[in-house]
Image (cartoon, rainbow, N blue to C red):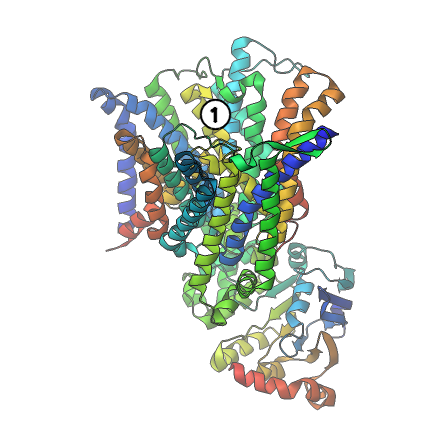
Amino acid sequence: MLLFIEQVLNGLQLGFMLFLLSAGLTLVFGVMNLINLAHGSFYMVGAYVAATVMLATGSFTLALLLALLSAALCGLLVEIIVLRHLYQRDHLDQVLATFGLILFFNETTRMIWGRQPLFMDVPEAFAGSVEILPGVPYPLYRLLIIGIGLLVAGGLYLLISHTRLGMRIRAGASNRSMVAALGVNIRWLYSLVFALGALLAGFAGVMAAPVFAVESGMGESILILTFVVIVIGGIGSVKGALLGALLVGLVDTLGRAFLPDLLQWLFATPTANSIAASLASMAIYLLMAVILAFKPRGLFPA
Amino acid sequence: MFELNRKTIILSIALLALVLLPPLSIALDESYVISSMSRVLIFAMAAISLDLIVGYGAMISFGHAAFVGLGAYTAAILGFHFHEDIAMFSFPFEFSGSNQLLISLLLAMLVAAVVAAITGMICLRTHGIHFIMITLAFAQMLYYLFISLDYYGGEDGLVMLARNELPWVDLADDSQFYYLCLLFLVAYLVLSLRLVNSQFGRVVRGCKINEQRMQALGFNTYWYRLVAYVIAATGAALAGALLANKTEFVDPGLFSWHLSGELLVMVILGGMGSIYGAVIGAIVYLLLEQIFAAYTEHWMFFLGPVLILVVIRARHGIYGLLQKWWTANV
Amino acid sequence: MSEIVLHTDKLCKSYAGLRANHNLDLQLLRGEIHALIGPNGAGKSTAIAQLSGELAPSSGRIFFNERDMTSLPVHKRARMGIARSFQVSSVFDEMTILQNLALAVQAHHGHSFRFWSNINRHRSFNQQAHALAEQFGLEQLQDVLAGELGHGEKRQLEVAMTLAGDPQVLLLDEPMAGIGPGGSKNLTRLLDGLRGRYSILLVEHDMDAVFSLADRISVLVYGEIIATGSVQEIRDNPAVQQAYLGESEESAHAQA
């Protein structure tokens, strides 16, 4: 039972990290109708910059600020230089061009930071653990990630449902030409939404840096999870992204933690372990296939 | 007729160059070229098979590599059981693998067809970006499945002890293997051209242009798209089985989304919806990769922006440019 | 003339509480041209989409030759003989006129799982396609890509495609949309030539075309049919005048 609570927390932590990534991605798709495979690159940039600054200065605050800034800046540049030309194109062109961006970003980080992964320590203020229940210690930093995820989710909700900018974003997501007709400066809106998405992805990168290894290509493994999230949630829906992220985070974590034991218990054969391992890593894809088979446009189609 | 001639001349020259490549490269003492060109020919087949659904059916599969991987693993596993003499199954009859190329290829295509039919039934319920993502998801599932198959090497992959056998042909000889690949490629190219110009091909193209209208006309578009999807998968599996023979090694990386992405790049670079374009795309992409790689280990740093430029500037790919050229100044 | 080909029974459609159609009882008689008119947003396109099978009704049923086909998919209805045209031309832009028509013909000739012979040389499809092109005065243009056609010609092709396979019912969704008075006259003449051979449900804003073509007219307002009758009956109907005609003259002028 205690293990279960711990794993649920781990699942939530992964879920909120995925949410940070998918919120931006789903908005970019909803508002600009753009598939951006390179979204994971901003996550990677955030992680690298944070790890580097942290190593050099030891200041987590500075690391966080610079990481967010560089992720947002990267996003802005990419939007202006490349993606702007692709809004009117079909998804295939977007997939390809952003695939090119991935190659470029991955290789650039390799040129700057080398092939060896970087490791970033948990900032001192958040090191150690707290007892969430009597006898159940849990790392403070991981709790922090959950807390920040909640904050960002709340913040995004306020931004989107209670501000002028949010109103425009929502309008843009549901009817692009209408927003243009209303005289909103679409270019500016697009750049802003894109930079915001990149910033959130960079944020996720900073959060992830002390948990995972910081290495070139780290963006892709999580990107695919992110896509699963937004497809499950319904593309363009932030609410769907939140739900999808938590679902994927929990299913993935709990599957990996408990499926092997469960199968062992059921079949008690040596192959059960290997089957369980593969089932666990396939679990979220199975989840996605099942959901799409019944709801081809996701849980909350925009 | 002049425009036709120009096209025919170019195609003949290209074919001639491919036929002459082995003796030439041996004469120039660069025989490694033969082996790497075999790889290019095999990828050209895979790219054609992808073009069948992407270029003609608007089914943008981001998991096509999965079928390449299935084909490759089929050949490798058959070979593994044959050489180790371990039964794969003993009911209804005992079967312990095979090292016959034709059997490998056939079974590879069969396995891919079955998997494509099952996954396709789910994938084709979705459209647009959802289709892209669900094909990716299924490919990822297979990727993790093969990683966890410790019996067949898991993450480390599986070595084929020897290439398959084919009567009268020595596949171990790089030149002969090359010609076999070339033969398969040409045959596959011709078949694909027939396919896209057939009654079935027109229906699939119609589904790409306007599926709603196709249904209103009375076509059950779902089944036509599904059959197209299965056909494309068998082509990729064929290429995969040949690839396993070429490298004599398979690993789960064959299923990776990276390879799926590269196949898409080949199709687009060459010019989708033209069959020939897929071949050109495969050749150019893999050559570019080798050229960049010869100068710098950071070749992706250059390849990435080249891709972006191609997408933004040259919308119909290289074949589109060629076509403009041979239909111009008539 | 009194046999019913297609009829609906209390057909309803609502989107998230918004009523698009309510208790639609529509009867299409064999051989008649039945115009469905009404102001924008009255639910005409929704009705066509339900009849052709693209939209599942929220409730109610649809009968074709006395057979309940409420839950049949689009392609089955098409093969049974219900053809439709689209308000926004949806022809195959990257194919020639002949190929467009041949594809429409092909839809009604068994299955198309034929993988080998070249479809461009299919004599019987091409002949029937050519005949359709001729009937609509498009034979000179038959080798032109549909995407390169003028708007009027596209509209003609759009309607011509519905005739392939000799359907019983034509559902024409604003065939005259945006083609101007000249094109409209031409298409009216062509549709008049189809009279008696097909049962046509015509959704149209062009009142000249409606009054000259229709045997009967149904008026749809806010998703409900408020009147059905001959041209004269509809013209004289005070409720129709009140609810619709005055307004539609304006909108027809605004569109022209």
Residue at the image point whose x is 54% and y is 75% from the top:
C176
> Which quadrant would the C terminus of chain A be assigned to in this image?
bottom right
Indicate left or right for C68 with A37 as reference: right
Residue A200 horizontal/vertical position (percent) = 51, 48
Residue type highlighted by circle 1: Ala
Indicate left or right for B275 with C14 as reference: left
Residue C211 horizontal/vertical position (percent) = 62, 84
User: Height in image: B71 above or below C224?
Assistant: above
Q: Quadrant of the rendered structure where residue B288 is? A: top left
Residue B202 versus residue C111: which sits nearer the camera? B202
Outermost residue on the left side: it is B28
Q: Is residue B121 visible?
A: no
Residue A241 horizontal/vertical position (percent) = 60, 49
Give the number of callouts. 1
Residue A199 horizontal/vertical position (percent) = 47, 49
Outermost residue on the top side: it is B85
Residue at the image point whose x is 41% and y is 22% from the top:
B246
Instruction: Using the image, name the chain to which the residue with label 1 belongs.
Output: B
Residue corresponding to mark 1: B241
> Which quadrant would the N terminus of chain A be assigned to in this image?
top right
Residue C130 versus residue C162: which sits nearer the camera? C162
Q: Secondary structure at mark 1?
A: helix
Label 1 crowding class (10 Å Cα cut-off): few <14, some 14-19, many 20+? Answer: many
Q: Is residue A129 visible?
A: yes
Residue at the image point whose x is 30% and y is 49% from the top:
B321
Residue C13 versus residue C1: which sits nearer the camera? C13
